[in-house]
Amino acid sequence: MKPFIGIQAGHQNIESNCAFALRGGTGAPGEKDNNIRIRDRLGQILISKGFQVQLDDANANCQKNTIGKDFDFYIALHCEANTHGKGGGFLAAPDPAFDSVNIESKRIVKAIKDEYFKNTGIEEHEEWITTAMTQYYMWSSLTAKTPCGIIEMGVAQDAHDKVILADTDRVANAIARGICKAFNIPFDAPQSPQEDPRDRRIKELEKEVEDLKKQIVELQKRPVSCPPAADPRKEQALIDIQHIINNL
């Protein structure tokens, strides 16, 4: 069975959330667009790797399509507000009080963390993790069997991070690498061995030799007038064969 991954774009459509208290959480400037764009690309990449994927907006806590459904992992995508004076991001698993499968959540979060920061160039800042992340509102809406985590992919308005976050493939692939690692699914396709060009040339020369041998046989079958005279085509064929053999 294909691993089933839920991906939420943080803040998307939050203005109409069924929980009135959440409606004002529209995110940092530029954050929502990053979250949506990277979520969509991440979904495409994971599908190409053999995962089953569900894409959610910020109202997934109100949607029957999400509530009560078991996922193999559920991840919420966000960008950090520019309140630290520098760029950076982090991943966090839920508070164990909100997560019945916390060990599995931490395992998958670590696998993503191991790939994300080294493949994007975003700096990791675990000290930025708050209870708003470990007690994220979605955690209480997911089933008890669903491991989950949140990622702050970078600071949307930081000059350094902004360039990286605009590189959709770079960021989405980095997250996908971590998810693939967590589920023991190869991210990079195995490379087929490259043929040595010298081997290819040897095969070509061997074929030429065989063709020339056939020409000689045909020439030998032809009648010759008396007195016998050297056939220049046969002589040239023999010279060609010797030349090819010498170059093997």
Image: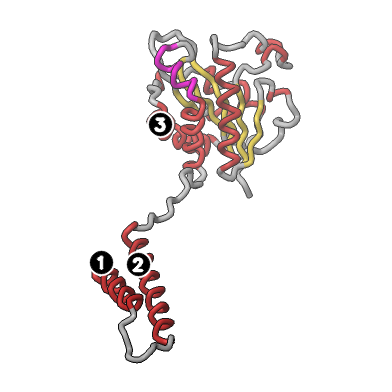
Q: Pick whichever, 75 or 241, lies toward us.
A: 241
Three-letter residue code for mark 3: Asn
- Neighbours of disc 1 within 10 Å: few (<14), some (14-19), many (20+): few
Q: Which residue is mark 1?
A: 247
Sequence-wise, the earlier of marks 3 and 2 is 3
Does the CB distance between marks 3 and 2 fall below 8 Å? no
Instruction: Establish if 218 lies above or below 31.
Output: below
Q: Which residue is mark 3?
A: 119
Quarter holding the C terminus is bottom left
Sequence-wise, the earlier of marks 2 and 1 is 2
Does the CB distance between marks 2 and 1 fall below 8 Å? yes
Q: Helix, strand or loop at disc 3?
A: helix
- Neighbours of disc 3 within 10 Å: few (<14), some (14-19), many (20+): some
Give the number of the disc on residue 72: none
Work out how far the residue at label 2 is from the one at label 1, CA to CA, in angstroms. Answer: 9 Å
Three-letter residue code for mark 1: Asn
Three-letter residue code for mark 2: Leu
Left or right placement of residue 213 versus residue 48 in this view: left
Give the number of the disc on residue 205: 2
